[in-house]
Amino acid sequence: FNFVGFVISLVTGSHVHLDLLGTGAFAAASLPQLLQNGNTLLRVKLSTAAVFTWGTKLAGFLFFRALKTGNDARLEGTLSTPGGTAVFWIISLIWGAVCSLPHTLGTTSSLP
């Protein structure tokens, strides 16, 4: 998702997709676990459903807001250069990985 966002940012210079892809990545990352059949622990199902619901709701709201405003003035300077755009999306990738650690670790543990 971050690479797609990076390419869109470079090609279009648009800010509309930032929150949709950045926050939507949380929902998309939880989807395989949510759709998995089999013997999944209840805590994993609940955590995954919560992450998916939160990510979808927040990404939708932020995308709607971005459509109304057209851009994010806070990021105007950062996204004006290819280097700044790359740094933004790399930080977004790191932030996503760090923020998803509690859910990821909780879903990969075999302990009930």
Image (cartoon, rainbow, N blue to C red):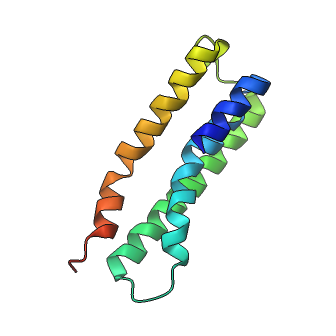
Residue 93 higher or lower than 104, as above or below: above
Q: Nearer the viewer, residue 18 or 50?
A: 18
Residue 41, image x, y percentages: 34, 82
Residue 49 pos. (x, y %) = 48, 70
Quadrant the N terminus occupies: top right
For the question of whether residue 62 can be seen, the reply is no
Q: Is residue 64 visible?
A: yes
**Picture quarter containing residue 13?**
top right
Quadrant in the picture for residue 42: bottom left
Could you say which is closer to the camera, residue 26 or residue 70?
A: 26
Q: Could you tell me which residue is drawn at 61 percent across and 48 percent down?
A: 59
What residue occupies the far bottom of the structure in this picture? 39
At 47% from the left and 38% from the top, the residue drawn is 93
Q: Residue furthest left?
A: 111
Above or below residue 1? Residue 73 is above
Q: Quadrant of the C terminus?
A: bottom left
Q: Is residue 22 above or below residue 72?
A: below
Tell me if 96 is positioned left or right of 85 in this view: left
Residue at position x 60%, y 21% from top? 85
Label total for image: 0
- Residue situated in front as seen by the camera: 63 or 80: 80
Image coords of residue 20 (percent x, y): 65, 44
Position of residue 9 relative to residue 109, above or below, is above
For residue 85, side relative to residue 49 (left or right): right
Q: Residue at x 77, y 26 (%)?
A: 11
